Image (cartoon, rainbow, N blue to C red):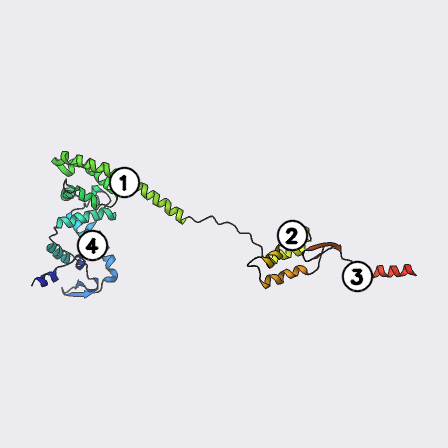
Amino acid sequence: MIENEQHKRLRESDCIIDWKHYPVEEEDGSITLEDWSANSDRVLREWMEDECSCDAFSLANREKCYMYYLYHRGYDRAKYEEYAKQRKIFDTNTAFWGLTDMINDGWLKSPAFVDWNDMGYCVSQQSIKNFLLEIFEPQQRVVYLSFLIKNAELVYGSWKKEVTPILNQHLLRQKAEAENRQKELKRQAAEERAKNKQPKEKPEYTLSVDEIIQYVRNAGSHTASAISDMLRYFAFEKDGWKKDVIKKKLRLLDTPLIVQGDLVQGNKNEANFQVPVGQVNQNVEHMNTNKE
């Protein structure tokens, strides 16, 4: 008997809406089970807009906060009520959590949009510390504490004098916490920027071996000779350069080349003039004529 009772004891996860078998009431009043899983996010958002919207004309009260807690987690109300009954969770507890959810999610835009006559128990002298603990951001705690202090008479009535000093103490501490939080966020942002900062791309100036060889063959100068010697050193002595294809290209430097009257062979500039064949023949004939 005890085991059966424990087996029926619900967990909070049991309260999630079964969107794959969601009950839908037809026109004739009959209930059919349909798969709404593809539209679950849209449906929940519509329900929240309809039942939990808070502004200057529709304040956050217990019902809105209660339903926000359920919709925010996708809970079925009937299942959650059974779960809360088993766990002895009061509706005021759930509404309290719904209010802080609204604040943390940014759903509630201002403390002025809360019906404090209905929700004042959340910020009572006994509850204020738990209320602040449930709010994630220190700056939001500062916002709500400042509002409560400024409007203490409206929120607390005759308890104003007793509660205000406590609120001021909390405000002092939360301002310091908010300041530290801002510094930490700035530090993290600076680290993130530094981590993501791309180094300035440096231009690369490269020359191929073919381009260097072409320069050597065309330069016809002592500079070309020095470059030629350097290439030969790298090709035959330096690791990573001992490749047949590069050596083959460097043999081009051994081919005689006439550049502006200079004979350039290999890496040596002979500084000789290449005499045309016709001119040699003329010189030979001239020598023969003189002999006669």
Which amino acid does the dot numbered 2 rest on? Ala
Say whether disc 4 or disc 2 marks the residue closer to the N-terminus.
4
Tell me the residue that label 2 is attached to.
226
Report crowding for label 4: few under 14, some 14 to 19, many 20 or more residues within 10 A (C-alpha). Answer: many
Cα separation, mark 4 vs mark 1, equals 30 Å
Q: Are marks 4 and 2 in contact (CB under 8 Å)?
A: no
Say whether disc 4 or disc 1 marks the residue closer to the N-terminus.
4
Which amino acid does the dot numbered 1 rest on? Ala
Mark number, residue 20: none
Tell me the residue that label 1 is attached to.
178
Q: Quadrant of the N terminus?
A: bottom left
**Residue 175 point in image, percent of width and height:** 26, 38
User: Label 3's element?
Assistant: helix
Cα separation, mark 4 vs mark 2, equals 82 Å
Tell me the residue that label 3 is attached to.
277
User: Label 1's element?
Assistant: helix
**Residue 219 point in image, percent of width and height:** 67, 53
Which amino acid does the dot numbered 4 rest on? Tyr
| Comparing labels 2 and 1, the label whose residue is closer to the camera | 2
Which amino acid does the dot numbered 3 rest on? Val
Tell me the residue that label 4 is attached to.
71
Q: Quadrant of residue 210?
A: bottom right
| Comparing labels 3 and 4, the label whose residue is closer to the camera | 3
| Comparing labels 3 and 2, the label whose residue is closer to the camera | 2
Q: Nearer the viewer, residue 246 or 33?
A: 246
Identify the residue at horizontal 62%, vertical 61% (top origin). Answer: 249
